[in-house]
Image: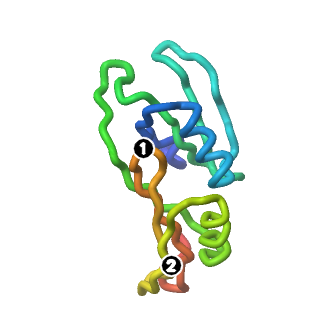
Amino acid sequence: MNISHVQFLTVPVADHAKARDFYVGTLGFELLLDHRGPHGQFVMVAPKGAQTGLVLVDYQVGGLDLVGPLHIQLHTGDVDADVAELRDAGVEVEDPQKMPWGRATSIKDLDGNAISLLEPSEFGNRPR
């Protein structure tokens, strides 16, 4: 096998523009692509420098009935700073909880997809 990484994950959304603005404006992701494709609008976002992107798609794409909600876990170096920034942006977020693998909290995007933020502990940050 010659697989090196996950290219993208598909995230069902109801409104491309609102979802794009949430991921880019609120979470600080980069907008990688936003153009019309053969199955509708193709919007890809990703954390800065990430190899894997999120493609924000309508619930019906290419004959597939994509359903949500999904769960996405993101790595962070400072969960407390991220919680403060999210709250400043008006996002409802709980205080981080301590787990054996790190400190984590979660939010929901505009379509109810769960997004966890994990600041890994030494146990949760093992090299691959």
Foreground of the two, 49 or 118: 118
Q: Residue at x 46, y 66 (%)?
A: 106
Foreground of the two, 113 or 2: 113
Q: Residue at x 60, y 59 (%)?
A: 90
Q: Amino acid at mark 2?
A: Asp
Q: Name the residue beneath numbered marker 2.
A: 95
Residue 88 is situated, as x and y percent measured from the top left of the image, at 66, 65
Q: Earlier in the sequence, mark 2 or mark 1?
A: 2
In the image, residue 123 sits, relative to residue 61, either above or below, namely below
Residue 46 is situated, as x and y percent measured from the top left of the image, at 62, 46
What kind of element bears circle 1? loop
Q: Amino acid at mark 1?
A: Asp
Residue 114 is situated, as x and y percent measured from the top left of the image, at 41, 56
In the image, residue 103 sits, relative to residue 112, either above or below, namely below
Q: Quadrant of the N terminus?
A: top left
Q: Name the residue beneath numbered marker 1.
A: 111
Q: Residue at x 49, y 81 (%)?
A: 102
- Does 77 sit left or right of 37 as displayed? right
Residue 3 is situated, as x and y percent measured from the top left of the image, at 49, 45
